[in-house]
Image: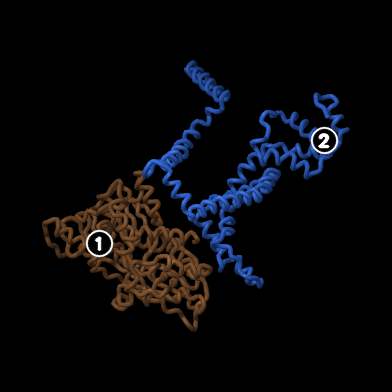
Amino acid sequence: MDNSQGQTDSRMSSSWSRFRRQPFLLTVPALTLVVLVMAVPLITIMIRSFTDPVLGFGNYTWFFGHQLNLTVLSRTFSISLWVTVSCVVFAYPYAFAMSVAGPRTRLLLVLCVLVPFWVSGVVRTLAWVIILQDSGVINQAVTWLGFEKLALIRTKLGVTIGMTQVLLPFMVMPLFAVMRGIDLRLIQAAKSLGSTPIKAFSSRSTFRCLCPACSPVRPSCSSWRLASISRRFCLAGRRARCCRRWCSNRSCRC
Amino acid sequence: MKRTYLAGGSFAFALIYGGMVAAQDGPVAGEVEEDSLAGETLTFVSYGGIYQDGQIKSLQPFVEKSGVELYSDGPTSLAKLQAQVESGNVMWDVIDTGDFLPYVHCGTLFQKLDFSKIDISNIPEGQVGECSVPAMNYGVVLTYNKDAYPDNPPDGWEDFFDTENYPGTRAMPGYPEPNGYIIEVALLKAGVEKDEMFPADVDLALDQYREIRDNLILWQTGAESQQIMESGEADMVIAWSGRARAAVENGANFEPIWNDWIVVMDQLTIPVGVENPDAAYALINAAIGKEAQETLTEETSYSPIHVDAEPQVDEMTAQWLTNTPERLEQGYLQNVPYWVENYEALSEKWAEFIAGY
């Protein structure tokens, strides 16, 4: 009994250590799902676009030969672009606030993002209709104040507003996940070494948060990061002396 | 119930189109065997809102007796249906459609119906197609906000286009499947004579709407048209009669114009490739039963297609019934065969129009 238990344990620990050595294996179930429900249908459609109903570029000739299709396509892209831009504008400061807030405030902020996310799409859409329509809340207020009605609903602006709200959680949550992983003491350190708050914020987080792909993977040791970041701020703040002092007993140059 | 036993394929086929007398000894409209569909599931697709609610309610006795699990989906979409049929993965078992689709796509997207499995003996003449039976009869009406036009109310389709004498926002159907009547009323407004209308100049008709584009809202679903009336978003709305009734019942101060209201019907169909056609037939057979048709009328104000149906409607709903002699006198019949024949050309121009051209 004891013996077999021990065997299982050792087998488990060996498979765990394999996962640890090759974390890629852990993504296999998710990858399989994505391939099955995303990649396969997409590739099928791609192939069919050349073969259905007859082999050739017929579908593409038809598609690009009709002004209507091109208009719809360009409309799709322009709205996507606007929605992405406005999502970044709203989500970035919000995610930052979430990452610096205390636990209670953070919970509140998370709820504010997630609760609308859990509400059915139909309900949210109808809520936007009620707010944006010509006889809606905004336009009633606007006309009451003596201005002319705004064309909000059934316009690109209206669509952008609605889509931004719907898609905001998808921008806030990943940004928050990355920002939370950054040691906030870095900003303190930067400031203590003479950097202005804006500079401290921008150099530190824009690089790592806005572009998580660019953030360095290697330095997991926070003291190394602290040192290298502080050095950067020393230089940025034109405090060469400070830098020299910092580097005097380390292997770095100013 | 009167039953006649007949033999002979050609005569039976004539019956399908004539809808005269029941020839089967099998199904009786509205009846289903106890627990015959226990463990089965059916997905019924229609146009949502009060209409689908009414349909589901009318099917409740069928659901309880047959033991079937009934799911509801919608709104009906030709594109979605086509994707399902072509991929061989049909999830919709019975579909409620508008006038044209079952004729345009008969045998390709919609099954040719086996009339030994449904009892069509009580349906009025001329309403049964090769791929469809009627779901109910109703009307498309021009409705207007009484507050917007207190002194000089509009009284016909031409006023829909007259933004000078009747200022205000208009709303009309804008879903992807086109309607022939939309073209016909615009052509009449443009001065085309009724007997010289066909072949129809679709561009000329759509141009009439383009001229009032700035004042035009296109609604996608019946529920949206109802919402537009209830919120006062538009002053004139082309709407399905039952949705207009529901809006008025909810407090919208709207009035229908019965002069030249459009006589239309919805169709019940079974897509090609459904998993369990017999269950789908059973649902259709239940939906065209006397009791189900009565319930549907009481809930929606849409007219029953069972000749013996005697719905008990309140006074308010009675005003919206379209099968009274007076209403039938005022109705306008669109040229269904022509639009079925020319559906593709119409669809293409309609798609451009609703996309903003």
Task: Give the labeled residue for mark 1.
Answer: B128
Residue visible at 83% across and 27% down in the picture:
A247
Mark 1 is surrounded, within 10 Å at the Cα level, by few (under 14), some (14 to 19) or many (20 or more) other residues, namely some
- Chain A image colour: blue
Chain (brown): B
Q: Is residue A139 left or right of residue B97?
A: right
Q: Quadrant of the C terminus of chain A?
A: top right
Q: Which chain is disc 1 placed on?
A: B
Is residue B314 in view? no
Q: Which residue is mark 2?
A: A235
The image position of residue A101, as x and y in percent, is 70, 45
Residue in front for this viewpoint, A226 or B221: B221
Q: Check disc 2 and give the amino acid type.
A: Leu
Provide the secondary structure element on which disc 2 rests.
helix
Q: Are marks 2 and 1 in contact (CB under 8 Å)?
A: no
Toward which corner of the image does residue A192 lie, by quadrant?
A: top right
Find numbered disc 1 in the image and state the secondary structure of the residue it sits on. loop
Viewer-side residue, A148 vs B353: B353
Residue A69 against residue A100 in the figure, above or below: below
Q: In the rendered structure, the residue with mark 2 lies on which chain? A: A
| Residue B102 in sight | yes
x and y, in percent, of residue B16 in the image: 20, 60
Please report the residue visible at 49 percent of the width from the left and 61 percent of the height from the top: B357
Residue found at x 52% / y 57%: A125
From this view, report whether residue A226 is shown above or below residue B341.
Answer: above
* Number of other residues with Cα within 10 Å of mark 2, as a class: few under 14, some 14 to 19, many 20 or more: some
Residue type (three-letter) at the residue carrying disc 1? Val
Horizontal arrangement in the rendering, residue B141 relative to residue B103 (left or right): right
Q: Residue furthest top?
A: A3
Q: Position of residue B322 (x, y in %)?
A: 33, 72
